[in-house]
Image (tube, helix red, strand yellow):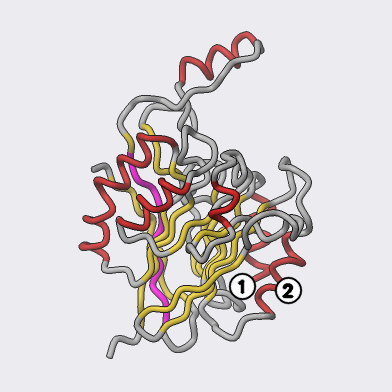
Amino acid sequence: MNTSYRILFLGDIVGKPGRNAVQAGLPSLIDSYRPLFVIVNGENSAGGVGITPDICRELQALGVDLITLGNHAFNKREIYPYLDTPAKIIRPANIPTRCPGRGIDTVTKDGITLAAINLCGRVFMDSYDDPFAAADALVASLETPHIFVDFHAEATSEKIAMGYHLDGRVTAVLGTHTHVTTADETILPGGTAYQTDVGMCGPIGSVLGMDREVVLHRFRTTMPTRFEVSNTPGTISGAMIDVDRETGRAFAIERVRFEP
């Protein structure tokens, strides 16, 4: 019997180029890495902001076990009722409980129950509840040692702090939101896999997934500009984590970059 398993996590899917890249590349990644669980952040998958039920079903048909979101969780109104269904999709946990959806869910495969938690940071972000207190409460409520955390945050300091805050208590703390892959993937002293940001699944040659000429115009002139998703081909960025089946602690993490 295998003593370990793998989690494949893909960063923010941005618009149609990101969705096309995942559609083209995810089957190959699954064949190559043989992950037990596949998790993706889909909060920018619909036109660069938000997600729709149809996109959720599209991703799940590709083999995605669970979808995480972030600060754009509610940008598409049609997702509201879907978030309250049994579908495996979670929005940030540290928001008012009256909002649609939930911030934690579980997936069970091959005798392993993996809990996934979605949190948003507060530094340079909207007014969210304390993510550290929310993390403590959610982790304490779980019976499984296999716990994956998508920390959707802007500030690297806040993400690093969360990694150490949860070290030894969760399997992984992986950052999303900035769309830029960081080169600091590591296993923290307590056995928690950590990376400040896993990057995006989105268009090459863009500015965080947006058309670079539009963004450059905004920076050069400071004039209001409607950002548009770049129409260049997409690439996949994410992370692969190796986990001990018995303890739920990670022992390896690898950056994943794949151009279909």
Instruction: Please rate how many residues cluster around mark 2, counting C-alpha atoms within 10 Å: few if below 14, some from 14 to 19, many from 20.
Output: few
Q: Which residue is mark 1?
A: 167
125 is higher (above) or lower (below) than 216: below
Instruction: Please rate how many residues cluster around mark 1, counting C-alpha atoms within 10 Å: few if below 14, some from 14 to 19, many from 20.
Output: many
> Which sits in the foreground, 56 or 25?
56
Identity of the residue drawn at 32% across and 61% down: 63
As shown in the figure, which amino acid type bears the numbered disc 2?
Ala
> Which sits in the foreground, 219 or 71?
71
Magenta part of the chain:
235-244
Of marks 1 and 2, which one's residue comes earlier in the chain? Answer: 2
Identity of the residue drawn at 74% across and 46% down: 123
194 is higher (above) or lower (below) than 146: above
133 is higher (above) or lower (below) than 111: above
Q: Quadrant of the C terminus?
A: top left
Side of 201 relative to 85 (left or right): left
Residue 4: image location, x then y, percent: 36, 81
Q: Which mark is residue 137?
A: 2
